[in-house]
Amino acid sequence: MPVIRLESSDGVVFDTDAETAKCSGTIRHMLEDCRLEDEVKEQPLIPVPNVNSTTLQKILSWAQYHRNDVPPAEDDETEQCPICQWDADFLATVDQGTLFELIMAANYLDIRALLNAACQTVANMIKGHTPDEIRLIFNIPREATEEDLCEIESSVSSSDSEDDN
C-alpha cells in the first residue's frame, strides 16, 4: 500500500496510508484525479495549506480509526446522526479552539463524518443554555445595549471637549 505524504500549512510532513488519507474527500479526489496512489518509488508531497500540523495530526488520528468506515450517503446531510462513543471521547480531549480548527479543517478536507461529529459536539455544548451562558462558554463578549452605547458616546464626546482645551 503506497504511503501518502501530506504537508501541513506550517511545513510539517505526515506520512500515512492511502486508506487513511482517503477519509478526506478532497485528498481522495486529488489522488484519483492525479493518479497519485499508483505504486511509485517516491510519492509527491500533497500540500494541505489550510490546516496546521496540530490539527492535521488530530485529523489523521481520527481518520486512522475510521479508515474502514462506509462514508455517509450524500443525501443524509439533514439527518442528525448520533456521535459514536470513540468520536465523543476523541472530541472531548480537545480544547475549544482545536475543536473549531477541526471543524474548519474537516470542512476544507471534505471529511463529512468528522465535520458532523464536531458540529454536533458544539451543538451539545449549546443545548439547554441561555444566551448569557453560551457567551460565557464560548467567551463571546455581550452585545452593547443602547445604554452602553450612550455611555460610550458621552465619554468620547467629553474626552474630545477636554482635548480642545
Image (tube, grey):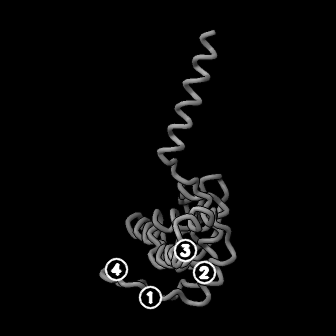
**Location of residue 67 by image quarter:** bottom right
Q: Nearer the viewer, mark 1 or mark 3?
A: 3
Q: Which residue is mark 2?
A: 64
Residue type at numbered disc 2? Gln
Per the model, the C-alpha gap separating discs 2 and 3 is: 34 Å
Asked if the residue at tag 2 contacts the one at tag 1, i.e. Cβ–Cβ closer than 8 Å, the answer is no
Residue at 63% across, 14% down:
163
Within the image, what quadrant is residue 99 found in? Answer: bottom right
Q: CA distance from mark 4 to mark 1?
A: 18 Å
Rendering coords of residue 97 (x, y %): 63, 62
Q: Earlier in the sequence, mark 1 or mark 2?
A: 2
The residue carrying pointer 3 sits among few (fewer than 14), some (14 to 19) or many (20 or more) residues within 10 Å by Cα, namely few
Residue for badge 4: 78
Identify the amino acid type marked 1.
Val
| Residue found 50% across the figure and 78% down from its top | 120
Residue 70 is tagged as: 1
Spatial CA span between label 1 and label 2: 13 Å
* Comparing labels 4 and 1, the label whose residue is closer to the camera: 4
Q: Residue 101: image x %, image y %?
A: 58, 62
Say which amino acid is labelled 3.
Answer: His
Q: What mark, if any, has residue 129 been given in the picture?
A: 3
CB under 8 Å between discs 1 and 3: no
Please rate how many residues cluster around mark 1, counting C-alpha atoms within 10 Å: few if below 14, some from 14 to 19, many from 20: few
Q: Dot 3 lies on which element?
A: loop
- Are the residues at dot 4 and dot 3 in contact (C-beta closer than 8 Å)? no
Q: Earlier in the sequence, mark 4 or mark 1?
A: 1
Of callouts 4 and 2, the N-terminal one: 2
